[in-house]
Amino acid sequence: MNDECKDNCPYAAGFVKEIAELKTGLDKTKDKVDELERSSIENRKDVDFIKTSISDIKDSIKTIANKLDELTKKPGNRWDKLVDYLIVAIASIAVSKFF
């Protein structure tokens, strides 16, 4: 630039316009970054909730598996008791016929 461009310089006007456009672009970029930060915080909360839910589901599955094991053992115990009762009944009948 030379001395003629002190007041009404076409170069300066171009720079002012470019600076204004850069400021606008910077503001838009800042808004996008702010939105991404908010979104990231919400996503973190969702991930934490999902982790907690999965942990709770794992605990529930363990509890259900333990109860299932207990239930599958019960019919065997019931049959054992039934056999015991039958033996006692047969022995009682046999004893009552001899006496």
Image: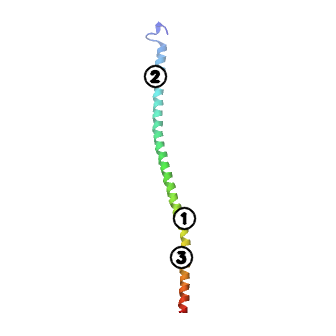
Q: In the image, residue 73 lies at what x, y percent? A: 55, 68
Q: Residue at x 46, y 22 (%)?
A: 20
58, above or below 17, in the image = below
User: CA–CA distance between discs 3 and 2?
Assistant: 91 Å
Q: Amino acid at mark 1?
A: Asp
> Which of disc 2 and disc 3 is earlier in sequence?
2
Question: 45 or 34: which is nearer to us?
Answer: 45
Q: Amino acid at mark 2?
A: Ala
Q: Residue at x 53, y 82 (%)?
A: 88
Instruction: Classify 10 Å Cα crowding around label 1: few (below 14), some (14-19), many (20 and above).
Output: few
- For the residues carrying marks 3 and 2, which lies nearer the camera in this image? 3
Q: In the image, residue 9 lies at what x, y percent? A: 46, 12
Q: In the image, residue 6 lies at what x, y percent? A: 44, 9
Quickly name the residue at label 3: 81
Quickly name the residue at label 2: 20
Q: Are marks 1 and 2 in contact (CB under 8 Å)?
A: no
83, above or below 4, in the image = below
- For the residues carrying marks 3 and 1, which lies nearer the camera in this image? 3
Question: 34 or 58: which is nearer to us?
Answer: 58
User: CA–CA distance between discs 3 and 1?
Assistant: 19 Å
Instruction: Indicate which disc residue 79 carries.
Output: none
Q: Regarding mark 1 in the picture, which secondary structure is present there?
A: helix
Q: Residue at x 52, y 66 (%)?
A: 70
Quickly name the residue at label 1: 69
Q: Regarding mark 2 in the picture, which secondary structure is present there?
A: helix
> Which of disc 2 and disc 1 is earlier in sequence?
2
> Which of disc 1 and disc 3 is earlier in sequence?
1
